[in-house]
Amino acid sequence: MIVVVDERELVTQGYTSLFGREGIPSAGFDPVEFGEWVNSAADADIHAIEAFLIGQTTGPCDLPRTIRDRSTAPVIAVSDQPSLEATLALFDAGVDDVVRKPVHPREILARAAAIRRRLSAISNYTDIGSIRVYSDGRDPEISGDVFPLPRRERRILEYLVANRGRRVSKAQIFSAIYGIFDEDVEENVVESHISKLRKKLRKKLGTDPIDSKRFLGYCIDWN
């Protein structure tokens, strides 16, 4: 999920629409609303955020510090001013990258993924047994062969792999896949997506690498 912060409602609505076309959940805030929300949001909601996008605000240099108190997700500033001083001020404030408008949402996603790779100092894929899961949007591979999946199922697999070794709840998966503010989709849809994903993995692997326990959630681990 991408969180967009800009004092112009037209801008936040525009970005959330563009991210939606790419299949990425997002939410837009004005700076005041964001400050109130980020300080009170549940840890699970904060954990579901992949990146923060900061646009025009009255105090853009305060936001990165506020975000860093709660999250290590990439913070990307979108600058309307071709000014070296303004760009340097944003970096000094703690943003991870600065981009100039206009910028395509795919570029923002690519920059956020690159920042996460640098921060974690790992490759852009994770191997679990014969499964290779990418973090850059590509379909996973099994034994070297591409294993195509619908977008929702692929993102669930990516999320489970990113949290390998610990259980995640249905609510956490829903927040990561659909966004924490989507009221038009029922949370139970996650069960349907996971059921289809497990069936495909079982057919391909001969075993099911996803373990589920009632009330505890899901985890993936397979050697």
Image (tube, rainbow, N blue to C red):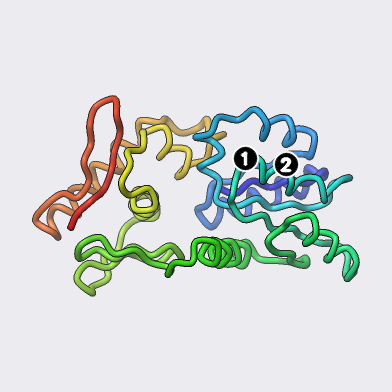
Q: Is residue 183 left or right of residue 130?
A: right
Query: Residue 16, labelled with which disc?
Result: none
Q: Residue flagged by tag 1: what amino acid is it?
A: Arg
Q: Is residue 177 left or right of residue 166?
A: right
Which residue carries the number 1 mark?
70
Quadrant for the C terminus in the image: bottom left
Picture coordinates of residue 207 (x, y %)? 11, 52
Give the residue displayed 23% in from the left and 74% down from the top: 144
Residue 78 picture quarter: bottom right
Give the residue displayed 47% in from the left and 43% down from the top: 176
Q: Is residue 23 left or right of residue 154?
A: right
* Image marks 1 and 2: residues in contact by CB distance under 8 Å: yes
Which residue carries the number 2 mark?
66
Give the residue displayed 60% in from the left and 52% down from the top: 51
Residue furthest to the top in view is 215
Q: Is residue 108 left or right of residue 198?
A: right
* 164 or 34, nearer to the observer: 164
> Mark 2: few, some, or many residues within 10 Å (few <14, many ≥20)?
some
Q: CA distance from mark 1 to mark 2?
A: 7 Å
Residue 194 picture quarter: top left
Q: Residue flagged by tag 2: what amino acid is it?
A: Thr
Residue 138 picture quarter: bottom left
